[in-house]
Image (tube, helix red, strand yellow):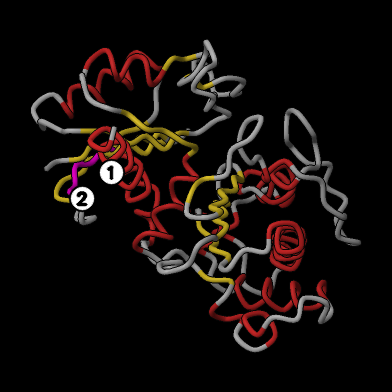
Amino acid sequence: MRIGAIEAGGTKFVCGVGDVQGHIEDWCSFPTEYPEATLTKVIDYFNDKKVSALGIGSFGPIDLQVDSPTYGYITTTPKPGWENCNVVGIIQSSFNVPVRWDTDVNAAALGELTWGAAQGLNNCVYYTIGTGVGIGLIAGGKGMHGLLHPEGGHIRTRRHPQDTYAGLCTYHGDCLEGLASGPAIQGRWQEPGSSLPVGHLAWEIESFYIAESITTTILLTSPQKVILGGGVMQQTHLFPMIREQVLQNLNGYVNASELLHNIDQYIVPPGLGQQAGLYGALALGIEAYKRTINE
């Protein structure tokens, strides 16, 4: 039984094939171009794979309301050419198989809950902090949806007292993404984060903003695990700084041993590493297949 997985990122697409036990047997990646060129490559990849279902974890915002006329569309993205792109419709017109889709970060969170750092739990939150900032929330084993889906990368946060950077989000300026994404680091310091030394003020400011967001998420959704992925979090020295700041923010108010005594195991990197999104898309595809056979 082959299940197709598509991690549709704003920078690159990753396509893969796996089984219902969670084994990825083949995968490839290519840069995200305009929709026609990119989705043609996706279709070409799966043409000879004989998949029984497909899962898609996509950059967004996306329409997840199944009764909506634009269900399956990427909606108000600033990504050139992708606004109002009918991703699910194009894929389904090429392969007569069930398709399930969600945001790329909800998919990554589901992958981590199924096979990664949050395995065995009922809920978790996954942050991807890189070119943009996205947050995926899994509650009761399922991705959280409502009017749309979580857009925690665009929450507002208190300003670090030493930060004068205006922020770069085209919608909100100094939201979390506008202050803490990889391009925001480069915009603030005029060089990429990978070039900045460990003791640079950049990392104190970065950990401050990430910890502010995590604190809000803990108080609002009470996740059993907080997972931090994305390119910025390759700076692993951020983890102890973020954990310390979260504890200071909470000030003992949340009386949970995971926070008070085991925070090193509570705020963690992805157990699936850079493939959390692909495994999450596989988990979505498995859900699509099981839903079909149970109907």
Q: Is residue 227 left or right of residue 222?
A: left
Q: Residue at x 35, y 42 (%)?
A: 284
Residue at numbered disc 1: 286
Q: Secondary structure at mark 2?
A: loop
The magenta segment is 15-19
Note whether 248 is above or below 51 in the view shown. Answer: below
Q: Crowding at label 1, few (<14), some or many (≥20) Cα neighbours within 10 Å?
A: many
Prevalent SS, magenta region: strand
Labelled pair 2, 1 in contact (Cβ < 8 Å) = yes
Residues 170 and 47: in front is 47
Distance, label 2 to label 1, CA atoms, is 6 Å
Q: Secondary structure at mark 1?
A: helix
Question: Is residue 17 on the magenta stretch?
Answer: yes
Residue 263 position by quadrant = bottom right
Residues 187 and 275: in front is 275
Residues 208 and 57: in front is 57
Tell me which amino acid carries mark 1: Ile
Note whether 116 is above or below 266 in the view shown. Answer: above
Question: Measured from the top left, where is residue 260 in percent x and y?
Answer: 70, 85
Say the numbered circle drawn on residue 20: 2
Q: Is residue 229 left or right of residue 202?
A: left
Q: Residue at x 57, y 81 (%)?
A: 264
Question: Is residue 57 on the magenta stretch?
Answer: no
Tell me which amino acid carries mark 2: Val
